[in-house]
Amino acid sequence: MMYEFSIAKRHILRNPRMALFTVAAVTLAVAVIVVFMGIMSGFQDEIITTTVENNPHIYIQPKKDENYVHLYRTVSGILWAYPEVEAVSARLTGKGAAKYKDEVRAISFLGVNPEDEDRMMDVQGDIISGDFLDLDRRKYAAFIGTGLAEKLKLDPEEGFTLARGNRSVRIKVAGLFKTGTAADDSLIYIPLILAQDLIGMGDVVSEVDAKVADIYQASLITADLNRRLGYDSKSWQDLNADILTLIETQRVIAWVFYFLIIAIAGFGIANTMIMIVSRRTREIGILMAMGATRRSVLKIFILESLILAPPSALLGGVLAYLAAQLIMSYDIELPSEIYMVSKMTVAMRPEFFIWAMAIALGVNFAAGLYPAWKASRMDPVVAIAGG
């Protein structure tokens, strides 16, 4: 093996242009694939964050033929009995209108116990003005999104009218929140008791929601709840089936893309190696006449391809990292109504660079197989005479 390696290395040093072309082709392929992996991973992470981490994992909704959950305190206690459950919040939702001076906007209000809601959704983390727990002490107060406050021209501690049907109340802005989603333009948090007054259906909620430590346990818990309770229990997988299907489809498309990039790079390298073999027929013939076996000739040309893999992987990884940093530095915004995320993110993970090495080795090895086999099948006499 040592002399085959020496000959392969000598061949590369004698033909630097071939080496540079091979390294450049694989470097570019590796960089494109790693960056694309990072973009896809970042996109999927953002979707999971938006649809899962920023929302409950379990939803317990009213029984059939009912519009509200009446025994929500009992349901909350049952949810807390599961060891995986980390937070539970009873919520009452409704549609209405917010009016301030001459400005009127359609809104969605969410009546909550602020401590429970904050434990489940970390609302305080999105608050930019005020203390969310104030809703526990102030019945006629609300937290509104920054987008809605801007549209209504409302400032903290100013009062506005919240109306639903023929019921309306005058409430003050206790604070503002900003999530970076469409909720900033239409959502209002109010105390649960105030929402119940607006709905006018008594001590009820729209649903009881929960978060769990392991999001993939949610479907098992909801299956058990559906057996035990008459309420309609759903997991985040049930409510986001279309999004999960989209992510799986994107993965398939991504692997097709990777294959095409690898194939293009591989054919380019193979073409270069075939040209090199055709120019070295006399040298190959002399080697075989001196006692080199067909197996040794095969090894020499495969080694020529493999020697160039590590620098290709290293340069491809560096180029991918720099490209990812460049993309992230521009803070590219995306229309969330189309892409479900508000900005482009590139998540560079250590395993992507392991993939870079594997891809470089695989492409160089596969691309060198046929030229190496062709060289090993030459007749020494014909090769020397033809050279």
Image (cartoon, rainbow, N blue to C red):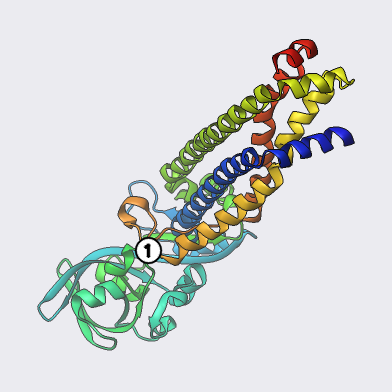
Residue 369 image offset from top left, x and y in percent: 70, 25
In the rendered view, would you say 360 is above or below 198?
above
Residue 377 shows up from this direction: no
Residue 350 shows up from this direction: yes
In the rendered view, would you say 304 is above or below 336?
above
Q: Nearer the viewer, residue 324 or 156?
A: 324
Name the residue at 44% across, 55% down.
51
Name the residue at 68% across, 41% down.
358
Name the residue at 65% across, 47% down.
313
Q: Residue furthest bottom?
A: 157
Name the residue at 47% across, 57% down.
46
Q: Is residue 170 left or right of residue 283?
A: left
Quadrant of res 113: bottom left
Q: Residue furthest left?
A: 102
Q: Nearer the viewer, residue 180 or 191?
A: 180
Q: Quarter of the image containing the N terminus?
A: top right
Q: Nearer the viewer, residue 64 or 89?
A: 89
For the image, the number of numbered tags is 1
Q: Disc 1 marks which residue? A: 205
Q: Is residue 274 left or right of residue 375?
A: left
In the rendered view, would you say 96 is above or below 293?
below
Q: Quarter of the image containing the C terminus?
A: top right
In the rendered view, would you say 200 is above or below 359?
below
Residue 124 image offset from top left, x and y in percent: 45, 77
Residue 265 image offset from top left, x and y in percent: 56, 35
Residue 53 image offset from top left, x and y in percent: 50, 60
